[in-house]
Amino acid sequence: MKRKAFVAGATGLVGKQVMYKLLENNNYDTVYVLVRRTMEIKHPKLQQIVFDYSNFETLDSSVPPIDDVFCCLGTTMKKAGSKEAFYQVDFTFVHELAKYFSSKSAENFLLISAIGADTQSSVYYSRVKGEIENAVSKLNFKGYFIFRPSFLMGDRQEFRLGEKIGIVLAVIISPFLVGSLKKYKPIHAAVVANNMIDNALSGKKGKVVIEGE
């Protein structure tokens, strides 16, 4: 039978790639996306749900049983404006989404995290990423896939100077990133998206962590 996918963060760099690739993938007959306002894209497989992330109870009447949940939610400290606002997006919204679909018996949960995610990190960003990884691992999914890319390349809607500089530097030193340092090589969002879908269809069970290129 064809699968049903759900994408949160479909307007972001990776989420948009995941959405487009799912629409092209013959293993899926329906792709649901959560959006704050309707996107212009039209496709017979696409179902857009205009949604307020602060109220997950409103999803009940909108979403049928889902096989694969692709969580591409995330922001930056600068864009969020405060630690509290960052935590709300990168922990609270992700956790509520995961709890909702765990209660609905979704098979797989695929989470975009970040390189360096660690609950013991002195860096707030990395610590929150580690905390959400752990929180979701306690829920009841057959497959739980964590993706920790380094610098993400692709066409963003907003300009991030610090990230642009980081990517340029990473590309320059990329030939020297070998062995355990390979995971710090920049990677295109489309490659991450393909890897997410491949893992969703792999039949793997339990917790799987994918790092780097």
Image (cartoon, helix red, strand yellow):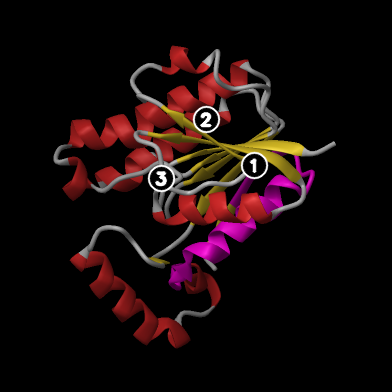
**Residue 118, disc:** 3
Classify mark 1: helix, strand or loop: loop
In space, the residues marked 2 and 3 are separated at their CA atoms by 14 Å
Is 1 positioned to the left or the right of 156 in the image? right
Considering every residue shown, the one lying at the far right of the view is: 1
Classify mark 3: helix, strand or loop: loop
**In the depicted view, which residue is nearer to us: 86 or 62?**
62
Considering every residue shown, the one lying at the far left of the view is: 81
| Residue located at (25% from left, 37% from top) | 86
**Residue 136, disc:** 2
| Residue located at (56% from left, 25% from top) | 138
| Residue located at (44% from left, 27% from top) | 95
| Residue located at (42% from left, 63% from top) | 150
**In the depicted view, which residue is nearer to us: 179 or 5?**
5
Q: Amino acid at mark 1?
A: Lys
Q: Nearer the viewer, mark 1 or mark 3?
A: 1
Residue 83, given in percent of the width and then of the height, sits at: 19, 36
Q: Nearer the viewer, mark 2 or mark 1?
A: 1
* Residue 93 vertical position relative to residue 213 in the rendered view, above or below: above
Residue 90 appearing in the image: yes
Q: Nearer the viewer, mark 2 or mark 3?
A: 2
Range of the magenta residues?
Answer: 184-209
In space, the residues marked 1 and 3 are separated at their CA atoms by 37 Å
Q: Amino acid at mark 3?
A: Asp
Q: Residues within 10 Å of mark 2 (few under 14, many from 20)?
A: many
Q: Amino acid at mark 2?
A: Val
Residue 144, given in percent of the width and then of the height, sits at: 63, 38
In space, the residues marked 2 and 1 are separated at their CA atoms by 28 Å
**In the depicted view, which residue is nearer to us: 116 or 83?**
83
Residue that numbered label 1 is attached to: 45
Q: Is residue 47 magenta?
A: no
